Image (cartoon, helix red, strand yellow):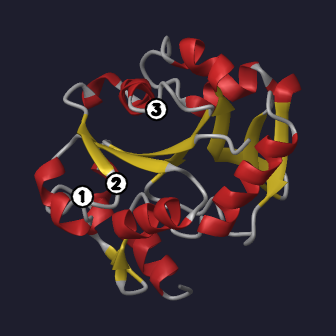
Amino acid sequence: MVNRIGCVVLAAGEGRRFGRHAHKLAAHVGGKSLLARAVDAACASQALSCTLVVGARFESLLCEVDSRRCAIVVNRDWKEGIASSVRRGLAAHRKDDACMFLVADQPFVSAADLDGLIESFRRVPGSIVALRAGEVWGTPTLFPRRDFAQLSKLQGDDGAKSYAVGSQERVTFVDACRAEAFRDVDTQQDLEALDAVL
């Protein structure tokens, strides 16, 4: 039986360090916005469906994605922290066998990385599966349905990785396709540095 696996792209944060004049996820790197890169990876993966959770200044992001490719959920409680976005995204995948979370500001994460998580989960269905690059691991992370209730109780800035850390004996790791998988964009300087290598 093929598992129903959903994917949630977390994109509700304010990106304060990037600056007030533009939403960082609308910024282009390598000819494509950060948000479009994340949604493209999610939609090109083996995940059955994709949900994009937006929040701060979300209106400026809507032109970056095709709503026919993924469901868009507005998290009006985004100021409460990333946990509120995890809860909103998870609510759209309650009937799935597993749900994968990724953040939208890591442009090196690919559909192949996400498929690696899915394939690992299919081999060990009860496991939490996280991406790893060297000694670093984190989001994207995939959780089986048995963890949905606890994930729904997360509060504040405790995200999916925080929960996985507390259940580390159940975590299976999948090596990322690129060593830079966890490079993210917080500032304009980060964007410029990434644009030079993408």
Q: Label 1, label 3: how many angstroms apart (C-alpha)?
A: 17 Å
The residue depicted at 73 percent of the width and 72 percent of the height is 178
Three-letter residue code for mark 2: Cys
Which of the 4 image quadrants contains residue 92?
A: top left
Asked if labels 2 and 3 touch by Cβ distance under 8 angstroms, the answer is: no
**Sequence-first disc among 3 and 2:** 2
Residue 106 can be seen in this image: no
Q: List the residue tagged with mark 1.
A: 67
The disc at residue 153 is none
Q: Label 1, label 2: how many angstroms apart (C-alpha)?
A: 5 Å
Q: List the residue tagged with mark 2.
A: 70
The residue depicted at 52 percent of the width and 67 percent of the height is 44
Residue 142: horizontal and vertical position, in percent? Answer: 66, 39
- Depth check: give the residue in front, 83 or 14: 83
Which of the 4 image quadrants contains residue 123?
A: top right
Residue 64: horizontal and vertical position, in percent? Answer: 24, 67
Q: Label 3, label 2: how many angstroms apart (C-alpha)?
A: 12 Å
Quadrant in the picture for the N terminus: top right
Which of the 4 image quadrants contains residue 185?
A: bottom left
The residue depicted at 45 percent of the width and 29 percent of the height is 90
Three-letter residue code for mark 3: His
User: Could you classify mark 3 by the number of other residues whose Cα lies within 10 Å: few (under 14), some (14-19), or many (20 or more)?
Assistant: many
Q: How many marks?
A: 3
User: Dot 3 lies on which element?
Assistant: loop
User: Dot 2 lies on which element?
Assistant: loop
User: Could you classify mark 2 by the number of other residues whose Cα lies within 10 Å: few (under 14), some (14-19), or many (20 or more)?
Assistant: some
**Sequence-first disc among 1 and 3:** 1
User: Could you classify mark 1 by the number of other residues whose Cα lies within 10 Å: few (under 14), some (14-19), or many (20 or more)?
Assistant: few
Three-letter residue code for mark 1: Ser
Q: List the residue tagged with mark 3.
A: 93
The residue depicted at 23 percent of the width and 40 percent of the height is 55
